[in-house]
Image: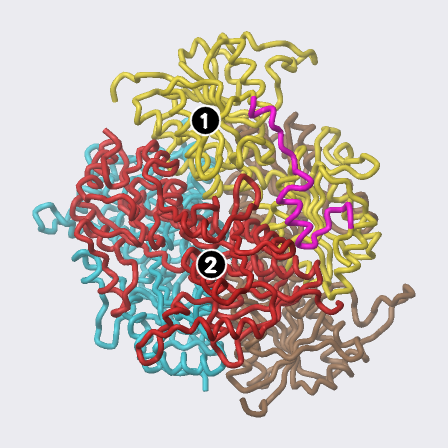
Chain colours: A yellow, B red, C brown, D cyan
Amino acid sequence: MNTPAKRIAILTSGGDCAGLNAVIRAVVLRAETLNWEVIGIMDGTHGLLENPPHVMPLRMDNVDTVVMRQGGTILGTTNKGDPFAYPMPDGTLKDRSGEIIDAFKKLGCEALIGIGGDGSLAILSRLAKQGGFPLIGIPKTIDNDLGVTEMSVGFDTAVAVATEALDRLQPTAASHDRIMVLEVMGRDAGHIALTAGIAGGADVILIPEIPYSITNIAAHIKILRQRGRNFALVVVSEAVKTPDGDNVSQNFFGGQKRLGGIGHIIGAQIAEACQAETRVTVLGHVQRGGQPSAHDRLLASAFGVYAVNLIQKGQFDRMVAWHDRSVIDVSIADAIKHYQCVEKDGTLVKTARGLGICLGDETPLK
Amino acid sequence: MNTPAKRIAILTSGGDCAGLNAVIRAVVLRAETLNWEVIGIMDGTHGLLENPPHVMPLRMDNVDTVVMRQGGTILGTTNKGDPFAYPMPDGTLKDRSGEIIDAFKKLGCEALIGIGGDGSLAILSRLAKQGGFPLIGIPKTIDNDLGVTEMSVGFDTAVAVATEALDRLQPTAASHDRIMVLEVMGRDAGHIALTAGIAGGADVILIPEIPYSITNIAAHIKILRQRGRNFALVVVSEAVKTPDGDNVSQNFFGGQKRLGGIGHIIGAQIAEACQAETRVTVLGHVQRGGQPSAHDRLLASAFGVYAVNLIQKGQFDRMVAWHDRSVIDVSIADAIKHYQCVEKDGTLVKTARGLGICLGDETPLK
Amino acid sequence: MNTPAKRIAILTSGGDCAGLNAVIRAVVLRAETLNWEVIGIMDGTHGLLENPPHVMPLRMDNVDTVVMRQGGTILGTTNKGDPFAYPMPDGTLKDRSGEIIDAFKKLGCEALIGIGGDGSLAILSRLAKQGGFPLIGIPKTIDNDLGVTEMSVGFDTAVAVATEALDRLQPTAASHDRIMVLEVMGRDAGHIALTAGIAGGADVILIPEIPYSITNIAAHIKILRQRGRNFALVVVSEAVKTPDGDNVSQNFFGGQKRLGGIGHIIGAQIAEACQAETRVTVLGHVQRGGQPSAHDRLLASAFGVYAVNLIQKGQFDRMVAWHDRSVIDVSIADAIKHYQCVEKDGTLVKTARGLGICLGDETPLK
Amino acid sequence: MNTPAKRIAILTSGGDCAGLNAVIRAVVLRAETLNWEVIGIMDGTHGLLENPPHVMPLRMDNVDTVVMRQGGTILGTTNKGDPFAYPMPDGTLKDRSGEIIDAFKKLGCEALIGIGGDGSLAILSRLAKQGGFPLIGIPKTIDNDLGVTEMSVGFDTAVAVATEALDRLQPTAASHDRIMVLEVMGRDAGHIALTAGIAGGADVILIPEIPYSITNIAAHIKILRQRGRNFALVVVSEAVKTPDGDNVSQNFFGGQKRLGGIGHIIGAQIAEACQAETRVTVLGHVQRGGQPSAHDRLLASAFGVYAVNLIQKGQFDRMVAWHDRSVIDVSIADAIKHYQCVEKDGTLVKTARGLGICLGDETPLK
């Protein structure tokens, strides 16, 4: 291969998900057809804070068909440190954006492709503006809460894993007359819970967007029993809070403050309210790391190729997005603005209510 | 339950696919929340030609969570007989539309929900017009060739199965320095081949929309070898014809005229042109019958609920469609008109070319 | 079909698992080839305490190929009530064995096939002796703790599900430099944890048979880090107790006393000892209800056919078992006696130690 | 790490299968705990015919948890050339065993671990004897035709893939009243076809060990129809020959003489004999390359560790084997002698007949 015509950089930022490696591969393969070089920055922007910076040249060889099929990211990622308020060992926060920008500039790259969710893209966008370097964003989030793209990388796989868990819980629930509670991920938005719940035949789905009462849930389960159903499937988004505002993270995680554990609370409450046996599964990071679904790999591939094409055309500060069977691009600023949690009268909620699923705020069946 | 307020009918028509049962379930569950009755017509419109007609009442009991997870259709289906030119035992074709309409009217249903592809929906639409009964269409096709909906039921699962096959072929190809040919379904459109090929890391993808030459393919594989790759993955849509217009169906299927077999032709041609070991897998109906993916089940559920809602609102001759994270409805006539094969400059083709995949009409790598 | 030549009964008892329906199907299909009738008793022996008894005739139609592929048991099961000390609503325990035996005799069955683990088979055996009716046992347990059979129905699937979870946790662990803790099932024996841990590439596996110390685990993880590994996978059997004898069930399950939760304790302890980020997944009943693996379905089919053959030959009080690629039969009394937890110098433990996996009682790597 | 105490070599030989990488990993990990070095020989013994020899040092880094989960073999393999009668470019056969032995000796390894089926192990054993170097064999074959071990690496995964295909064919068969023919692998032995057929609910299973007649098959399908079944699943081992001794390989594979294609013959014959629609799936190498099942990975891990232990103890010319939940070792000579095709009165055949499955030589149902 000749001297590369251009050099670009890529990094993954924020929580990992399935499909990141497929994005990286697509960027590298597209770049190689143009005789460009790709530098991978390790551990989000953190790799640029190391001395020497943690970076790796990316070639077809190290992003081949095997890597594409794997969850996670070969570049590593992080969601711990905001470069503008970076947690230092002494407990203080420090603005390290200048260091990152300087290190990036020394790489000699003409543009940066950043793969991240709304938080990461906001930070990268601020860095790019301050540093004056061109940025292209690629949306990834298992939460699917970026509004301007129909799908973000990672969501389809997370939903598939959660749905599969429901498929496995249903027969054992029915065999033992039990109520199964499945706690799934979802930081602020209930898309995973609602989508997987509908696809997996849940009877009750609790999401952070809709307040629930145990009374409604118990009444719903009572009606199901009257209709002859001896079991129930309950999906709870980890971000759900009790009517009192509780979430059990503090008790569970050795003091680390995190989401999760609400499944156990709901399970105990239902057990009492329904005089039923309940069992709880907390899927956790199993939802992040799976082999990417075909759909996520397609999305990742299309996004990666399109992102390089934008650089080729000199169009920057754009985020690629999926719309109507196609990739389009939008301004990153617009993308971040359109945060999308579950719409209360949108298709997902209407579908759930239409199926007679209890969302916690009412008892849909009579 | 009280006397049903309304009675509607549902049937599945054309080739089966994953997700049909999830549509049926959604229709029944939504109808039950409205206190409506649902009649299932067996084997497409054929059930109405039997005496007595083959129909079954559908209730929550017989479309429960288990059925929803299964491929195929509990109603049976068919793609053999056009009611307007129905093949009779004596070999003649007969217009039996009148019989079907009469039988349907005797069921006392206020509307029919027909789940089918473009062919089936065209026939059902003609029947509905002639018979003067209200119709709602729900799009299903593994080929995803209906243009007005972003996705039809069954496509996502078919792609997932084909992609999984590529995931399994890759390591054995690499272990033995082989070229693997995977023949996938796709009657007229190459969406399955192209989508699964991209998602599964194919090196060559042949679709009916783009003519190929073995010369281009061999040149591409030669370049891959020069780059150090010791294997290749080739995806061929069953509808692909050789430059001479051949397709081997006649030889293969005991005289039955059908698509398929082209994988073996391509495999033999590549073996000769590249002096390589090739192996051929013909996935066949494995692509149709799988457990529906989470995405197909969501689509199916959303479509089913929305279809009943349309009947409730008295809106007919509409097909439900997926657009921008939502269900919408369009006129069936419009839907049928917008046949969508793979666009030569669309996102799928651009993504494939961008990744350096050979589509048979050129040698993308240098 | 003619008048049945014989009538037999079948029930499933104890915790459910994948493959029970495949056993039931095999029994029915084999019985049909002999023109025998099969009566399914619902909810373990509990169905016989109802008036009228909860039983269902089983025919090829209701145990067809679809049912065989499903987890759980269409007969229902239970692990709550010992017939000899049955918990009554008033809180007392009552010997109800006589009622069960009487009800069974009224069914007019020549023999009973009981599918269960060691506990269930012991109870069924006592009932059979007291009632003087012929019994055949079929071993099922996800724990694989019955010693005279190499494999019991349900184990292979449970291991597969737990292994798959590790496959999904590995890439996200590696992407974020995390230690992932997976709590798996296993009442008294660590077979699931050890087998899945080996198959899934775990670094630490804790089982109830081997006491652990956090010091050993932390030392092991330190060595892995020195070798360049940035993540670790830890598998914990739910039956593991802390050195202080703790298991967190009391706190977790709304007062219900059950196994489980130890994963969270271990996770918190490792987080502190290693100054690492840990994340915990509690797989729970997902391990029970999955679609049975091919191996479990083979085992189930071979067991079911063989069990009927034993009845045909008039050989009773036998349990079928898998040995050296074949089904054999042993006395139920012997089978129950040979309880098999993980052997400390058996193949599983030696394999784990050979791979350098930390079992909590030592630090295998230097 | 200090100077290695010992150096050993490993190679994979014959057709690849799932689990080979897990064996390699286990050998390397076990060797590392002993401070030994492992040399991987590429492409079976062929790597030793290259100048310089194709070998790679194997360390924990390059056989980590990711590789273990992949099908195929990172060492490459081959089943084309017998070193004692090696096909030369000029078409002659040449004894190249001396060259291989010399090259092996130059590696300075104290022993060779060879992973292969009966053919490969026979050749390796002859090489070891002639060259006077210690050999340990590890059995792998998707055919499971090595008699002294209950299971060989790769069989469980191949069966799982074939069973899954039947799971997917069943619903589409039932939806369209079709007979589905699935051609599976199996060179001389019918273990895959029989095991997957039983596990996957097949109605007809044809294996090379049992001659079939279409008359029997047609009679069987007729009885199924009389019982109300509208579909049938037929599994055919690729090694099955027609009563006339035909196998269609010649026609299919561009002149390359190979097994396979019999599925299409059987499909056409059944279509005619039963006046039914048939569809044929040829799974092909999809069965080889899949991600190894948990069971295959356990087997692989246990075998790999045990093989190194044998070398440590100075025990050679042994093959590891699985017996009664444990790894044992047997002499390679004995292992090769005990070829095991399907026993006509063994558990598999009895199970199939007991379920009423037609094996082609009789019509089991009345």
Residue B351: image x %, image y %?
37, 34
| Residue corresponding to mark 2 | B116
Rendered image: mark on residue D136 = none
Evaluate whether label 2 is on the same chain as label 1: no
x 45%, y 39%: residue:
A325
Within 10 angstroms of label 2, few (less than 14), some, or many (20 or more) residues?
A: many
Of A97 and C83, which appears nearest the observer? A97
How many neighbours does mark 1 have within 10 angstroms: few (below 14), some (14-19), or many (20 or more)? few
Task: Using the image, name the chain to which the residue with label 2 belongs.
Answer: B
Query: Which quadrant would residue A342 be assigned to in this image?
Result: top right
* Mark-to-mark CA distance, 2 and 1: 65 Å
Q: Which amino acid type is shown beneath numbered disc 1?
A: Met
Whether residues under marks 2 and 1 lie with C-beta atoms below 8 angstroms apart, the answer is no
Q: Is residue D114 visible?
A: yes
Dividing the image into 4 quarters, which one contains the N terminus of chain A? top left
Q: Which residue is mark 1?
A: D1
User: Is residue C323 part of the magenta span, yes or no?
Assistant: no
Secondary element type, mark 1:
loop
> Label 2 is placed on what type of residue?
Gly
| Residue C352 percent across, percent down from the top left | 54, 44
Magenta span: A334-362
Chain letter behind tag 1? D
* Quadrant the C terminus of chain A occupies: bottom right
Residue C359 makes an appearance in the image: no
A26 sits left or right of B362 in the view:
right
Is residue B296 positioned above or below A324 on the image?
below
- Residue C163 position (above or below residue A148): below
Residue A336 x, y percent position in the rendering: 58, 24
Please provide percent x and percent y for residue B45: 47, 69
Q: Looking at the picture, does residue B2 appear above or below residue B315?
A: below
How many callouts does the rendering have? 2
